[in-house]
Image (spheres, rainbow, N blue to C red):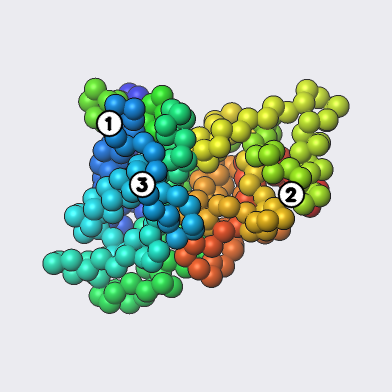
Amino acid sequence: MEQRFITLGEFIIKKQEHFPYSSGELSRLMNSIRLASKIVAQKVNQAGLVDITGAFGSENIQGEEQQKLDVFANDVFIQTLINREIVCGIASEENDEFITISGPNNCNSNKYVLLMDPLDGSSNIDVNVSVGTIFSVYRRISEVGTPVTQADFLQKGINQVAAGYVIYGSSTMLVYTTGNGVNGFTLDPSLGTFFLSHPDMKISEDGAIFSVNEGNFNQFEQGVKDYVAFCKDDTSKKPYSSRYIGSLVADVHRNILKGGIYMYPGTISKPNGKLRLLYECNPFAMIIEQAGGKATDGHQRILEIEPTELHQRVPIFCGSKNMVDKLESFL
């Protein structure tokens, strides 16, 4: 079978042996994510035609105004996972607390929990900018057969057994890793099927793109300011290009494919940055590292950070290894 005709389902089955403790859970879990992402993609593509853009009228636990698509995507992913009784617990950026799933068939016996940002960048949806879903999977540490506990979700990123994202843009792509490389699948909307389009994705060791919100420049620590100045003024070669979309999934996806560094440092007003460790930083750190890159908070490896709360924020610098190393030399 030619590589371009390998479907996501076929690929998962073929690679099933790489999933720790596997007895079919990965296939069922990824099938749930695949289905939910297709439903969300269809709704995203209707933006402007149906009443799905704009604010929902409430705030999430972080005090951020929820968009209608935030709520829709969150409901779709949660309900799809619950219906298939594949995980024993879910934590979402949009929910105050984690969700325990028991169900009629005792989902407490399931081994995995899922954490997610159901629709990253949703405030950009009404201006037709790419948005995405980010997800992370852990093996529970509480006793199987009992309800999940917060400790099941507050695990270091190195314990992730799978991580991935879906980007809803000019095409819909699902990118994921189970710790054996990164692979990308593009949705063929005419067939409703994801096909392997980006096998064994690698990020180059060097890049020429730096992505940071320079509107916060005056609030950055001096080392970050110095690195940004270096990116602009390096006279040893052509200066780097600044590319910042403001949609995390879109910015990091581009840098994986083209090489570069993504930065969301702490600021004077927000010393811990903006991005959530469990829902955004850990899954992207795993993907970046599996693609050959590096992810740090400026002082330690993202995947080694000990979580203390569900909605914990941390600074993040991730991307091409040599660019991240150079950034660290300024800190």
Res. 99 visible in picture: yes
Residue 30 in view (yes/no): no
What's the residue type where badge 1 is placed?
Val
Snapshot quadrant of residue 217: top right
Between circles 3 and 2, the one closer to the viewer is 3
Q: CA distance from mark 3 to mark 1?
A: 14 Å
Circle 2 SS class: helix
> Within 10 Å of the Cα at label 2, are there few (<14), some (14-19), or many (20+) other Cα atoms?
some
- Determine crowd level at label 3: few under 14, some 14-19, many 20+ residues with C-alpha closer than 10 A: some
- Marks 2 and 1, how far apart in space? 39 Å
Left or right: residue 269 versus residue 176 is: right
At a point 34% along the width and 33% down the height, the residue shown is 44
Give the labeled residue for mark 2. Answer: 219
Q: Which residue is mark 1?
A: 50
Q: Which residue in the protein does label 3 denote?
A: 56
Image coordinates for residue 306, horizontal then vertical, percent: 57, 67
Figure quadrant of residue 228:
top right
Q: Circle 3 sits in a helix, a strand or a loop, which is it? A: strand
Image coordinates of residue 241 in percent, x first then y, are 69, 27
Identify the image quadrant of residue 299: bottom right
How many marks on residues? 3
Question: For the view shown, which residue lies furthest in the front direction?
Answer: 57
